[in-house]
């Protein structure tokens, strides 16, 4: 009986440790700053901060599953949100058509990353860092180092500010994208192939899995998700700024890697990614309300990333024994 209890406790902790830590942080900050933290305003602020990070972390998670990385995501979302604003206010393109163009550009960038990684055999760190740097340069060229702003149609700004079924529509985006990713990964042949390729590419290829289709398809789909996030980000900020995108890079990695330590320990998974990003949002919001200096946020993200990599490595090792 005692062994059963201990085994059950270990399983619960292994699967839900991050969620428990998130709840512990909520309780802790609610006690330390009772007048401001346990409020609807704080909850909305955390949700507002985590929407874009979560969507981008899902894109990064998919790439990590196949054993690759994408360092271009932060720079690309920066470029695409600038283009979204610019196409409307500078080129006077109708916003629905601008959305189609941005989605197309995002998928093309994803395809370029996939081609560099698969066909040219360039290490994914190097390849995507290169495309990301190019995207950053293009952002500076397009804006001339200035912020882009102007009159935006209400239909476009409603992409972020509207409500659906009483919920902020931004939350609905996260739920839909995460649910779709979860369904594909857990209940389709494609999802099983992604995990198989990431676990052992050579063995997966010997079973008939096309690494070309999986690698290219994952990068393309990741690029599409990044473009969706860029459109939402542009609707939220209503301005285009070169400095916006790169700030997302570290939280994206923290969310994607730390998420592999919960719900399905040892494997990157969508709901674990959401919980990891939520943990980041709660921690940063609480520290800010405690009066932490501006440099605490990158410190917190950096420490969490290191811990996340360590925990992910440990979980992966244990996962291999299951």
Image: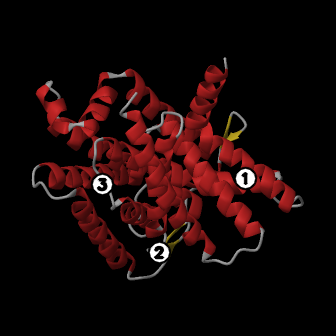
Q: Residue at x 58, y 58 (%)?
A: 236
Tell me where residue 180 sits by quadrant: top left
Q: In the rendering, at what x and y percent does residue 293 appear?
A: 68, 78
| Secondary structure of the residue carrying numbered label 3 | helix
Relative side of 281 to 152, left or right:
right
Q: Looking at the image, tell me whether mark 3 or mark 1 is earlier in sequence order.
A: 1
Circle nearer the viewer, 1 or 2? 1
Q: Kindly give the residue lying farthest to the front in the view shown.
A: 2
Tell me where residue 124 sits by quadrant: bottom left
Which residue is tagged 1?
A: 25
Count up the numbered dots: 3
Which residue occupies the foreground of this view, 196 or 101? Answer: 196
Quadrant containing the C terminus is top left
Q: Check residue 280 in the rendering and tell me which mark sits there, or answer none.
A: none
Q: Is residue 234 above or below residue 295?
A: above
Q: Check residue 243 in the rendering and tell me which mark sits there, or answer none.
A: 2
Q: Looking at the image, tell me whether mark 3 or mark 2 is earlier in sequence order.
A: 3
Q: Looking at the image, tell me whether mark 1 or mark 2 is earlier in sequence order.
A: 1
| Secondary structure of the residue carrying numbered label 1 | helix
Q: Check residue 105 in the rendering and tell me which mark sits there, or answer none.
A: 3
Whether residue 298 is visible here, answered yes or no, is yes
Q: CA distance from mark 1 to mark 2?
A: 30 Å
Q: Residue at x 37, y 31 (%)?
A: 321
Q: In the rendering, at what x and y percent does residue 294 appear?
A: 64, 77
Q: Residue at x 45, y 81 (%)?
A: 146
């Amino acid at each position: 009986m005692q062994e059963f209890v201990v085994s059950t406790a270990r399983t619960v902790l292994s699967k839900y440790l991050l969620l428990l830590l998130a709840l512990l942080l909520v309780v802790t900050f609610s006690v330390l700053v009772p007048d401001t933290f346990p409020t609807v305003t704080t909850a909305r602020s955390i949700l507002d901060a985590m929407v874009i990070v979560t969507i981008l972390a899902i894109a990064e998670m998919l790439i990590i599953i196949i054993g690759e990385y994408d360092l271009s995501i932060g720079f690309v979302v920066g470029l695409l949100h600038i283009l979204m604003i610019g196409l409307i206010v500078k080129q006077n393109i109708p916003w629905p058509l601008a959305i189609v163009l941005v989605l197309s550009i995002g998928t093309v960038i994803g395809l370029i990353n996939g081609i560099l990684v698969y066909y040219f055999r360039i290490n994914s760190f190097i390849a995507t860092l290169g495309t990301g740097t190019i995207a950053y340069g293009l952002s500076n060229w397009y804006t001339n180092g200035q912020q882009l702003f102007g009159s935006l149609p209400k239909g476009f700004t409603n992409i972020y500010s509207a409500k659906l079924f009483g919920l902020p529509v931004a939350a609905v985006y996260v739920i839909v994208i995460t649910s779709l990713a979860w369904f594909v990964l857990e209940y389709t042949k494609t999802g099983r192939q992604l995990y198989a390729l990431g676990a052992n590419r050579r063995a997966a290829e010997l079973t008939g899995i096309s690494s070309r289709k999986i690698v290219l398809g994952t990068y393309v789909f990741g690029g599409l998700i990044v473009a969706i996030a860029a459109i939402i980000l542009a609707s939220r900020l209503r301005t285009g700024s070169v400095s916006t995108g790169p700030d997302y890079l570290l939280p994206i990695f923290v969310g994607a890697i730390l998420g592999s330590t919960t719900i399905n320990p040892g494997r990157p998974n969508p709901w674990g990614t959401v919980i990891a990003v939520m943990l980041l949002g709660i921690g940063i919001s609480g520290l800010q309300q405690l009066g932490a200096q501006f440099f605490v946020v990158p410190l917190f993200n950096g420490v969490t990333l290191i811990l996340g990599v360590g925990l992910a490595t440990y979980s992966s090792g244990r996962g291999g024994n299951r």
